[in-house]
Amino acid sequence: MTTKDTDTGNVASEDLLASPQYVVDAAYTKSGGAHFPAPLPFHQPLENLRRNFNKFGVPLPLAMERLLRKSEDLDGWRDILLEELGLSRAEYNLLTNDLRPLTL
């Protein structure tokens, strides 16, 4: 891929962060299963969602809270609190449920 192939023209940086034009999905597939170094495992769709909500001035945790049904169990609130911390479910599981040691 040359510079000419990846020229984004006059697209604003914020727009490219929220919706990149050139993505190598294989890189995210490979890093999605890795556990070290931090901040792995990386969840690209979640990061895209975070950036899209931020672009419109609505933090993802706030949107999640507003859309949460009051009758839902604690899983919904757990996900909101995880998002407040910037953690995905995979990162949460690695820190709380996984028996794998956090070493090299």
Image (spheres, grey):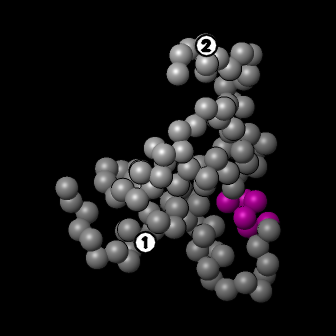
The residue where tag 2 is placed is: 4
Inspect the image, locate mark 1, and give the three-letter code of the amino acid beneath it. Answer: Asn
| Total tally of numbered discs in the picture | 2
In the rendered image, residue 22 lying in the magenta stretch gets the answer no
C-alpha distance separating marks 1 and 2: 42 Å
Front residue of 48/58: it is: 48
Instruction: Classify residue 79 as left or right of residue 27.
Output: right
Q: Secondary structure at mark 2?
A: loop
The residue where tag 1 is placed is: 93
Rendered location of residue 50, percent (x, y): 65, 49
Front residue of 72/11: it is: 11
Q: Identify the residue at the far left of this view.
A: 104
Question: Are there few (<14), some (14-19), or many (20+) residues within 10 Å of tag 1?
Answer: few
Rendered location of residue 30, percent (x, y): 41, 51
Rendered location of residue 90, percent (x, y): 47, 66
Q: Which residues are magenta?
A: 61-66
Task: Report the mark closest to the observer, 1 or 2.
Answer: 2
Rendered location of residue 78, percent (x, y): 58, 74
Secondary structure mostly seen in magenta is helix
Residue in the picture at 36% in, 51% down = 38
Label 1 or label 2, whichever comes before in sequence order: 2
